[in-house]
Each structure stands twice: as C-alpha cells, then as structure tokens.
Image (spheres, grey):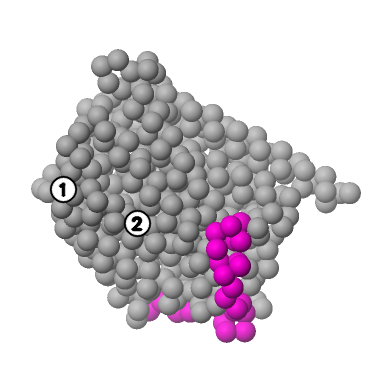
C-alpha cells in the first residue's frame, strides 16, 4: 500500500514531530540535574560517575526488553494508542522521580522511564508508514531535528530550574509529558491501516526473537553492528559528560544546560536541513560514513581540548555526526517489508539498548579510573578518545558493508 497522499502525509508528519519534540524535551530537561541528584542521594562524589552509569544502563536494559514488545504491539494495534499510553506513563514516571526520597526509588523511576520511553520505536515506525522509501532519510532527519529541538529547550530549561531546585526539572518534565499526551490524544492520527497490521507474536516480540530479523540479510546485519557502535559511542555523553564538564572545566548546571542546548541547535540544523540535500547528492551510504567520520574527529578533539572554548569549537565537526543516524535507519527500512517496520524499529532499539547497558558502565568505569587523587589512567579525556576510536571503526564497517552490498548486486 502506498503512503498517504501528500496533504494528509504533511499533516501527519507535523503531528508526530510535535509529539516527539514535547516527549524529548521532557527527557532533556532532567539531564543537567540527574547526576547531581544521584550524587546528593548517594552522598559520595567519587561514586557519582559509577552510579550514574548504572542508572543509564538500567534504563537501557528496560529499553532492550520492552522495545520489541512495543514495536510488535504497534504492528498489531496501530502506532497511535501505543504512543499515547507510553507518553502518559512517562508523565507519571517523572512525578515519581521528583518525589524519590532515595536511590532505590530513583532506580524504580529509571526502570519505568525505560519502559515508557520505548515509544520511540513507534515514532520511527510511524514515519516509515507515512513516507516512501526514497524519502525516509529526510523523514528520519526531521524526527532527529525534533529530538534535537527538545534537547535545545529541555536542558536549557533544566539548567535554569536546577539552580532553583534539583527536583524542579522533574516536575516540569512531568508537565511536558502530560502536554504531549493531551496533544496526541486530540490531534495525532493513526498511520497504520487495519489491512497492513500483523498479528502479535511473542516469538517476534521478545528481544532475542526480534534480533533474528537483523540476521535476515547480510547487509542488514552489518548495518545493525554499525548502529550498535554508534549508540555505544553516543552513550559516552549520558554517562560522563556532566561530571567531565564540571571536573575539567568547572562548569555548573547552567553552563552544561546551555552547552547541551547549543548541541541541540547544531544537531537540529544538520538533521533538519542538511540530511536531505546531502543524501540527494551523495546517497544514503556515503552520507552515513561521512557522518560517522566527522563524529570520530569531533569526539577526539573534545577529549584533547585543554580549555572549555576549544571543547566548544570541537562541537562543530562533531555536529555532522547527525548525518549518520537517519541514513542508517533509511538503509535498514528499505530491506524489510512494510508490515515489519515496527519489528525492525523494536530490534534497532534493542541493539541501541544493549549498547546503552554496556556503554555507560564501560565509560563510567573508564572515567572513574581517570579522575581522583591517584588515577589509574593519567588522562581525564581517555573516555572521549576511546569513543572516537569506536566511531572510526563504525565508519570503516559501514564503508566495507557498502562495497559488499555492491558486489552482491553485481554478481
């Protein structure tokens, strides 16, 4: 079945982008203060990096378990109800974290956040429903721009509110999630017609069953590994960035929030404005490899930057990393059927979640070894240099997979 006609498709894209914007903004608003709240509740500065890494990993573990289920449910019942239930649950979860009296309650909040945030699976499947294959890179770029827009306003507002109280951003996040739910309830249309839905199956919905889809095509498997490496490197920021910025450059919540907002602005520009024209000129695969290569250069420069201003300058090449994610998604959606888009996005989210489980613990441990009175690793930017090497490996694998795919096509 063809995607909806142009006017309906344009309206549907607008609706899903606004929903994604509000959803991500609610998550971004707590980024500048969550590590500080963990530090306050743990009572230990030295353990904050490890605890923060463990909390991010806990969130990712729930994503791994729940994303395929939610993706398959959206293939069965449609995208709209799944998105609405997830967003409503996210609002309740932020309220729980705002009231958390200790680390155990905060851990429960991170578990629930991992479950409810799995709605991103349905968001990407929604975009696949309403866009033709040759336009999906641009569509995913628009979703990325909406996500970035949320991370512009979210961390900036969170940084300001964090100066008032570490709990205030959580209440604001709950309000934004509630607003996203109300908006979606009244204006978000369904994107998956009944005749295109697939029966729910636990064989497909469990994370290990969903991952089998990624082995159905050699190039799909290679792209899944590239996706894993991208996510693995990206979780460097959620695991150690706030602590790193404070320890190396003396930045507080306001400065971190402002910097994250600047990152969001640049990422929004790359994904919203550059992806379409660059893909049209270079193609999906070359654009993907280019984005990964620039990301590797940018992260390496961040790790080596001796001053805050040089760190900010390194964000410019790193911003082109945003070319990679939409093109990976586009290449992968073109290798499965329309009725498997939800399952594919669930499998992709599971891959990202595996990286999210391992990466924060890994980078949190690396960071813990590189700070303190007698660090085992003498360079505080070691975690950034390792992440740059991971992205470089992803670029090489993506390039090699393209050559392999071209050889198969010619044979």
| Image spot of residue 146 (x, y percent) | 41, 58
Query: Mark 2 against mark 1, which lies toward the viewer?
Result: 2
Which residue occupies the foreground of this view, 213 or 132?
A: 213
Residue furthest right in the image? 411
Q: Considering only order in the chain, which callout, 1 or 2, is on the residue closer to the N terminus?
A: 2
Is 110 on the left or on the right of 14, as rendered?
left
- Residue tagged by mark 1? 166
Residue 303 x, y percent position in the rendering: 41, 25
- Tell me the residue that label 2 is attached to: 111
Count of numbered badges drawn on the protein: 2
Give the residues drawn in magenta, as a range: 187-211
Residue extending farthest to the bottom is: 194
Element on which disc 2 rests? helix
Q: Which residue lies at the image location 68% right of the left edge and 63% below the top edge?
A: 336
**Badge 1, how many Cα within 10 Å: few under 14, some, many 20+?**
many
In this view, 42 is above or below 178: above
Q: Is residue 290 left or right of residue 368?
A: right
Magenta-span inclusion, residue 146? no
Q: Is residue 8 visible?
A: no
* Residue displayed at 56% across by 67% down: 205
Q: Residue at x 31, y 64 (%)?
A: 90
Q: Where is residue 409 shown, x and y percent of the image? A: 83, 51
x and y percentages locating residue 356 in the rendered image: 45, 46
Out of 67 and 324, give the one closest to the viewer.
67
- The vertical placement of 188 against 136, above or below, is below
Badge 1 marks a residue whose secondary structure is loop
Query: Does any portion of residue 203 appear in the rendered image?
Result: yes
Residue 35 horizontal side relative to residue 237, left or right: left
Kindly identify the residue that appears in the image at 35 percent across and 31 percent down.
Answer: 312
Q: Identify the disc placed on residue 32.
A: none
């Amino acid at each position: 079945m063809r995607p909806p006609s142009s006017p309906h498709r344009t309206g549907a894209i607008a609706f899903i982008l606004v929903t994604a914007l509000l959803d991500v903004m609610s998550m971004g608003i707590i980024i500048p203060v969550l590590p500080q709240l963990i530090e306050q509740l743990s009572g230990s500065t030295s353990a904050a990096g490890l605890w923060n890494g463990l909390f991010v990993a806990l969130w990712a573990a729930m994503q791994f378990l729940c994303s395929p289920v939610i993706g398959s449910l959206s293939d069965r019942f449609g995208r709209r109800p799944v998105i609405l239930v997830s967003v409503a649950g996210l609002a309740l979860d932020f309220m729980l974290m705002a009231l958390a009296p200790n680390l155990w309650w905060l851990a429960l909040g991170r578990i629930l956040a991992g479950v409810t945030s799995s709605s991103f699976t349905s968001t990407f499947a929604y975009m696949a429903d309403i866009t033709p294959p040759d336009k999906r890179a641009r569509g995913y770029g628009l979703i990325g721009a909406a996500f970035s827009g949320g991370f512009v306003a979210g961390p900036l507002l969170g940084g300001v509110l964090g100066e008032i109280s570490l709990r205030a951003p959580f209440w604001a996040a709950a309000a934004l999630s509630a607003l996203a739910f109300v908006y979606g309830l009244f204006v978000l249309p369904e994107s998956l017609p009944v005749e295109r839905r697939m029966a729910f199956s636990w064989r497909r919905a469990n994370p290990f069953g969903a991952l089998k889809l990624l082995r159905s095509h050699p190039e799909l498997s290679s792209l899944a590994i590239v996706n894993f490496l991208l996510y693995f490197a990206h979780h460097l920021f959620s695991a150690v960035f706030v602590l790193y910025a404070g320890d190396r450059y003396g930045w507080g919540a306001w400065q971190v929030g402002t910097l994250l907002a600047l990152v969001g602005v640049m990422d929004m520009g790359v994904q919203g404005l550059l992806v379409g024209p660059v893909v049209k000129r270079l193609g999906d695969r070359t654009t993907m490899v280019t984005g990964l290569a620039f990301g590797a250069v940018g992260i390496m420069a961040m790790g080596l930057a001796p001053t805050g201003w040089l760190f900010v300058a390194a964000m410019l090449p790193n911003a082109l990393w945003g070319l990679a994610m939409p093109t990976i998604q586009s290449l992968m959606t073109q290798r499965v059927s329309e009725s498997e888009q939800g399952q594919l996005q669930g499998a992709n989210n599971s891959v990202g979640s595996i990286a999210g489980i391992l990466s924060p613990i890994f980078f949190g441990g690396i960071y813990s070894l590189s700070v303190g009175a007698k660090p085992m690793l003498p360079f505080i930017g070691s975690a950034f240099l390792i992440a740059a090497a991971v992205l470089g490996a992803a670029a090489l694998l993506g390039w090699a997979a393209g050559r392999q795919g071209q050889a198969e096509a010619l044979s």
